[in-house]
Every structure is written in structure tokens, then in C-alpha cells.
Image (cartoon, rainbow, N blue to C red):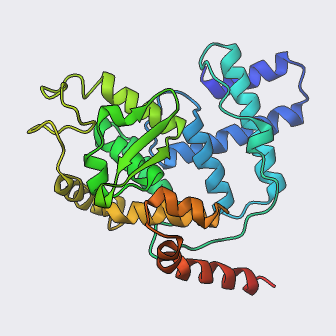
Amino acid sequence: MNHLETFGQWLIEDGKSPKTIESYCNDVKQFQLYLAEKAADEQQPISRFSFVRYKQHLLDEAFKVSTINKKVNSLKVFNDFLRVKGIVTENYIQLKKDCVPIATGSEQVVNALTDKEVEKVLFYVQDTAKVSRRNRLIIHLLLYTAVRVSELVNIKLTDINGLTFTLMVRGKGGKVREIGIRNDVMELIKEYQVGERKESRFHESDYLLVSQRSGKMHRDAVRDWLAKISDDVGIKLHPHLFRRTCATLLLRRGVPIVTVSKILGHHSVDMTSSMYIQTSRKDKQDALDLL
């Protein structure tokens, strides 16, 4: 008996009505079909990563907010079932945080990855048969810290603070800035350190990212790898694309441009404005076109 069948039996034993059971099971089945379509290399039936990507998929496909929230609730119940049975140990879904408060319109990014393209890249690097832990970490660092590739390869172990979840970045002109690290990115850093990196003959290197040939990865190696996987992903990838994507997504999500400027390490807000003004104008025009 698979997880879905066991889930249905659990709902029956819990006294749920036949219609409720059918609704919950259909929603979970659609979630499983989505993961199968993405060829997701998931080690468990649900995770925070897979849920967030599925929710974004529903938003991208313009499902009604009520429909999305119903599916979110069904997956929350499924998550509860898995915890009770000891199949997973965490609550990956929080209704107050994860239910959609308002409808989200379609968006388009100028000179940056779209939400769907981000999803495509993230799913690709989840495949451990194709992508090493180090390279998966590289994608997440580029996307979620907006570091330049030169800054990326110069990250030292001492630059990472696991208590405050911060990263000290040495930028152009010797300027140093502090960037927050997401929980999932910090987990990837730890996984890489205790696993793949620890097994490297350069594990005593001061630098976070090591290669097979030296104790510090070269930025050209990052560029070459991104170019190599571009055909597989179907998107022309290069390091600076992720920096632009991070900045664009932050601005679209309402983060003040002053904050974005500091994250990017620009010497002035005017520099940030000049580089991303086209995106802002496009978003504003899209909003007016909805009237």
C-alpha cells in the first residue's frame, strides 16, 4: 500500500466524510503527479522545497486563490499524516504563512530568469545524479545572495557565521558587506562541508568551494559549468544572470531599493536604480495594463 492509499485509510479512521477524503486525496495525487513530471529526486514524499515549488507552479498557472489554498490545506493534512506515521519529522507547511492572501498576476522579468525558469534550474540541480553538492550550493549562493562570481569563489569558511546566518562578502575595491543567508542555503553549506568537501584532498583549504585540482575554485570553472548545463536546462546560464535575477525578484517583492543596493554591494542607490529602472518601468506598465 503506497502513501496515498494509506493516507486515505487514515482519513477514514479519522472520521472524515467521503467527499472530504476524495478532495484531500485528489489534491495529494495532483501534487505527486507534478513531482513525477518534474522528475524530482525527492528522498521523501513531501519537503519544504517541493511544496514551495508546487505552490509557485499553481500561482504561475493562474489557479484561483481559493483553489490554491484548498490544495495547500490538503497538503498540510498530508504532512500531518506523514508526521504521525513517522515518515517525516517536520511540519513543512504553515497555513498562516503559506496560504495565498491575494491573487497574484502574471509577471515578466527583464534580463533575468522568470519564476518558471528559476524553478526549472532549481529542479535540475536537485538531481544528485547530475549535479554535485558543491555545484548545487553554487546555484543557491548565486541566486539567493546575489554575489558576483569573483566574490563567490573567494568566500572563506571564516566568512560564514552559522549562528547569525550571515555571510561576509569581500567586494570590489576591498569593500566588505554582510549578507543574510537563508536557512535552506545554510543547510546546503553544512551538507557540502560534512560530506563532499570533507572527502576532498583540499578539505583543509581556507576557502569554502574547492575543486579537484586546487584548494580554491576558479571563477572560470563556475562559468564553464553553467555553460555546460545550459543545454540540459534549456536556458543560457551565466553567473551574473543569477545576480540580476536575485535583485529583480527582491525589487518585485517590495524590498526597498536601498536594501537591495546594500545586498548587491553597489556604491550608491543611483547605481542600482540605473541598472534596474527598466524592470521597474515594465512592471508598472504591466500593472496599468490590467485596468
Q: Position of residue 258 (x, y in %)?
A: 58, 64
Residue at image position (75%, 25%) is 8
Taking depth in this image into account, of 84 and 148 the one nearest to the observer is 148
Is any atom of residue 89 visible in this view? yes
Is any atom of residue 124 visible in this view? no
Tell me: 29 left or right of 276. right
Tell me: 51 left or right of 69. left
Residue at image position (53%, 35%) is 183
Q: Position of residue 203 (x, y in %)?
A: 19, 26
Quarter occupied by the N terminus: top right
Taking depth in this image into account, of 248 and 58 the one nearest to the observer is 248
Q: Position of residue 165 (x, y in %)?
A: 50, 34
Q: State whether residue 79 is above or below residue 31.
A: above
Q: State whether residue 271 is above or below residue 125.
A: below
Taking depth in this image into account, of 253 and 86 the one nearest to the observer is 253
Residue at image position (54%, 61%) is 260
> On the image, which quarter does residue 27 sit in?
top right
| Total numbered circles | 0
